[in-house]
Image (cartoon, grey):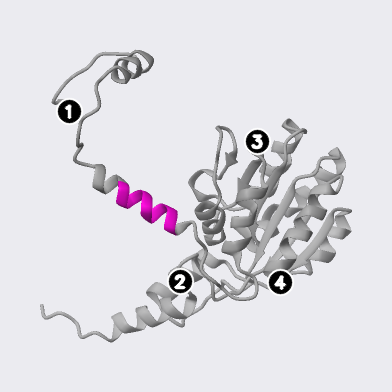
Amino acid sequence: MFRPSLAIQSGMPEFAAAVAQLQPVAAPRWVRWRETARAEYEAGLVPAAAGALDLGRVMAWLRDRLPDDAIVTSDAGNFSGWPNRFLHYRRPGRQLGPTSGAMGYDVPAAVAAKLVHLDRLVVGFCGDGGFMMTGQELATSMLEGVGPIILLFNNAMYGTIRMHQERRFPGRVVGTALKNPDFLALARAYGAFGASVARTEDFAPAFEEAAAHNGAAVIELKMDPELITTRTTLSELRRQAEARQAQPAAPE
């Protein structure tokens, strides 16, 4: 049984209105913590250089490019760290994500969002594994004549599972490598706009062309498989795991 220190019986609007009338505390104990947390957050929005295709810089460009009412959908997977870390959400109802981390959510969600909001830009983010589960919903998009833009992060693996393999069993890679089709050709086979991007400077022109296209679009991002998250690499994960395993066992 839970016993509160101070029980307040109130509706949320009434409580918020009452709190708004309170005088601010001169020096709340969490001011320094809040300032530190804010500084860390803002520092995290600055991408670090990361190879020919710098996904951090790509997301930072999108952060400024997307209109306030754009709808962003996302699949499950490590790739989602890039939009989740670098994008901003300026209004309610802008982001759609999978419940309980279910893969295969993104493309159907992006198509559905565009069907409901024809006047809003819809951008979907998915990995190659998630796209291969439900990417055929592009056919629905073409049938209905609606056009979300799908950003497809291609690292030829189930990245999240591979990350856990390297953390727990370094070097023992099982069932996570993918043999993908030509995504550019696949998009065009559906009748959608297709582009494949391997360099940072090529993303903006490809995105603008996709946004101007009257219909669905797929932009493949040919990412470095080593970049398993926004902050570390597969090689670093393996090195850390091997170092832990090399340590002598604690005496019983």
Looking at the image, tell me whether mark 4 or mark 2 is earlier in sequence order: 4
Distance from disc 2 to disc 1, alpha carbons, whole Å, reads: 41 Å
Question: For mark 2, does the 10 Å Cα neighbourhood hold few (<14), some (14 to 19), or many (20 or more) residues?
Answer: few
Circle count? 4
Q: Are marks 2 and 3 in contact (CB under 8 Å)?
A: no
Residue 42 located left or right of residue 188:
left
At label 4, which amino acid type do we have?
Ala
Q: Are marks 4 and 2 in contact (CB under 8 Å)?
A: no
According to the image, label 4 marks what residue? 198
Distance from disc 2 to disc 3, alpha carbons, whole Å, reads: 32 Å
Residue 69 tag number? 3
Name the quadrant containing residue 108: top right
Name the quadrant containing residue 158: bottom right
At label 2, which amino acid type do we have?
Thr
Residue 71 located left or right of residue 191:
left
According to the image, label 1 marks what residue? 2
Quarter of the figure with the N terminus = top left
Is residue 76 shown above or below 73?
below
> Residue farthest to the front?
26
Looking at the image, tell me whether mark 2 or mark 1 is earlier in sequence order: 1
Q: Are marks 1 and 4 in contact (CB under 8 Å)?
A: no
